[in-house]
């Protein structure tokens, strides 16, 4: 598969939902699903990088691949929400990066917590 732009991914997800997925879930349902997927990612992060341990040793064997899959699930549901609410993620990501760059131009460089 070739590299995808965000806009292309939004289009692919839209086509997938309308053909294979039949239709979008309601926005509130997708919001709940997004929270569920973020929770699954957080559980793995807590075990891989935090103090929690895996309940079964075999879980650790696939944890990194599982974490990557959960990240993809989070992105998929987020793109579904963007599609069904009319958000062009490419445009808002560009605006958001500009806002952060302007606002935080010197903030992080001058933060002793990051430079110490």
Image: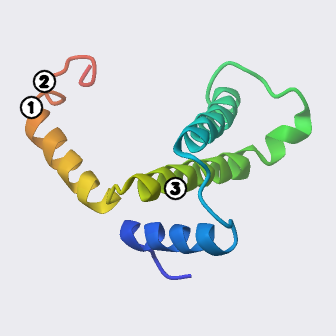
In which quarter of the view is residue 24 placed?
A: bottom right
Nearest to the eye among marks 3 and 2: give it. Answer: 3
For this view, does 41 lie left or right of residue 10?
right
Q: Position of residue 19 (x, y in %)?
A: 65, 75
Residue at mark 2: 110
- Residue at x-position 79% and y-position 48%: 62
Nearest to the eye among marks 1 and 3: give it. Answer: 3
Residue at mark 1: 106
Q: Position of residue 25 (x, y in %)?
A: 62, 51
Instruction: Assign the C terminus to one quadrant of the image.
Output: top left
Circles 1 and 3, Cβ within 8 Å, touching? The answer is no
Q: CA distance from mark 3 to mark 2?
A: 38 Å
Circles 1 and 2, Cβ within 8 Å, touching? The answer is yes
For this view, does 64 lie left or right of residue 86?
right
For this view, does 91 lie left or right of residue 15?
left
- Helix, strand or loop status at disc 3: helix
Front residue of 10 and 98: 10
* Outermost residue toward the bottom in this view: 2
Q: Position of residue 87 (x, y in %)?
A: 34, 55
- In the rendered view, would you say 102 is above or below 17? above
Residue 30: numbered disc: none
- In the rendered view, would you say 91 is above or below 41? below
- Residue at x-position 52% and y-position 44%: 27
Q: CA distance from mark 1 to mark 3?
A: 35 Å
- Residue at x-position 72% and y-position 48%: 66
| Mark 3 / mark 2, whichever is N-terminal | 3
- Residue at x-position 48% and y-position 56%: 79
Crowding at dot 3, Cα within 10 Å, few <14 / some 14-19 / many 20+, comes out as many
- Helix, strand or loop status at disc 2: loop
Q: Position of residue 60 (x, y in %)?
A: 81, 39
Residue at mark 3: 80
Front residue of 23 and 48: 23
């Amino acid at each position: 598969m070739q590299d995808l732009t965000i806009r292309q991914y939004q289009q692919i997800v839209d086509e997938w939902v309308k053909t294979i997925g039949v239709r979008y879930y309601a926005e509130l349902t997708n919001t709940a699903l997004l929270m569920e997927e973020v929770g699954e990612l957080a559980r793995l992060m807590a075990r891989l990088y935090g103090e929690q341990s895996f309940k079964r040793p075999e879980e650790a064997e696939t944890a990194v691949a599982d974490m990557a899959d959960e990240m993809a699930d989070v992105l998929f549901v987020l793109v579904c929400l963007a599609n069904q609410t009319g958000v062009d993620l490419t445009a808002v990501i560009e605006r958001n990066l500009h806002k952060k760059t302007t606002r935080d131009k010197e903030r992080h460089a001058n933060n002793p917590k990051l430079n110490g």
